[in-house]
Image: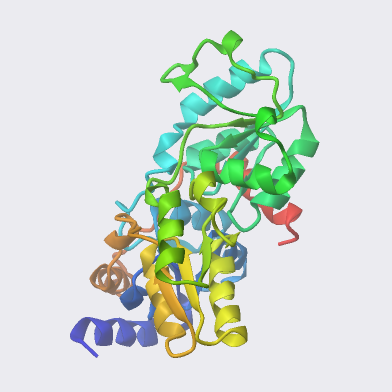
Amino acid sequence: MNDITAAVAALKEQLGDRLCIMGHHYQNDAVVAHCDVTGDSLELARRVPGVDAEHIVFCGVFFMGESAALLAKPGQAVHLPEPGADCMMSLMTPAGLARRVLEQLTATGRRVVPLAYVNTTLGLKAVVGEYGGAVCTSANAETMLRWALDQGDGVLFLPDKHLGRNTAQKLGLAPDRQHILRLNGHGLINPESQPLERPLLLWPGCCAIHAQLKPGQAAAARAAHPGCRVVAHPECRPELIERCDAAGSTSFLIKEAARLAEEAPGSTLIIGTENNLVDRLAARHKGRCHVLSLGRAICPDMAKVTEAKLLATLTAIAHGTAEPLTVEAALCGPARRSLTRMLEVCGQ
């Protein structure tokens, strides 16, 4: 045990039940080792309301900390070890631009319900909440898209076009009933020339990390490992997902590795997602199942959270000098509605 690891452990013991450390699966092993709760976006959102600790330290990117702050109890403080850890995808949908597009879409009298992937800013979640929409995660996107389609005349899915298209495929919504919006900084480009009457309208954003994984890598994996099983996260391109044996959320990928290790020992599983998770699964199932990465996929923002920064945060909490995350009060109500709608539809 190195000095930093020992110091974090000592502070955790000192703070006791006043502290809860939560971490996303994409965090590195040194950070995950200290987490009291780990999960994907859905699992972490579900768990926050049940945490009683005075201090929640959230090891993940900024939008996840905002969500935790929205769902936390009055008086709880949410801390981010690295406030500068952002999400490139979340920055692809400025709240003001999304509002302008929704205004344009609803000006014709249509009821367009926004459905935002949880990888979005507090401001965007607030816009979504105002327009009667909700958020979703990769784990419940199918359930939430079905819900949103039942609420009005159409759905604006944002910001991840890949997750939107992959989810629509699962629901049997044909490509000619979908449309990826053409936008500029002012809103829709030539709206009269776009098929905006289609039931599913997609924001032209994506996860730059998952988008690095290409369809050809699935074929290369099968050639190198005959008989392997290939699975990927639905933030990947649809053209890649079509070449996989299955696709699903982070939680699904974890369960799939465990299932294969149990039911088909000695087999090979190729996973297309953030490499920290894949490496952890490879170590967990070593000797029972070969778990390999489909390709390089490292989130630089998740990597900004380090064990040393976690130590600094815990030290500040212990000394009473920590500055918790604050969220704009005017945005909290509608943003919280977009989150709680998801939890209600999915039965918590």
Residue shown at 25% from the left, 70% from the top: 312
Q: Is residue 148 left or right of residue 128?
A: right
In this rendering, position of residue 212 left or right of residue 191: left
Residue at 52% x, 57% y is: 233
**Residue with the most extreme right position:** 150
Q: How many marks?
A: 0
Q: Position of residue 148 (x, y in %)?
A: 73, 39
* Quadrant hosting residue 194: top right
Image x and y of residue 313, in percent: 30, 68
Residue at the left extreme of this rendering: 3
Q: Quadrant of residue 32?
A: bottom left
**Residue at (52%, 37%) from the top-left corner?**
124
113 w.r.t. 165: above or below: above
Quadrant location, the N terminus = bottom left
Can residue 41 be seen here? yes
Q: Is residue 316 left or right of residue 152?
A: left
Residue 35 visible in rendering: no
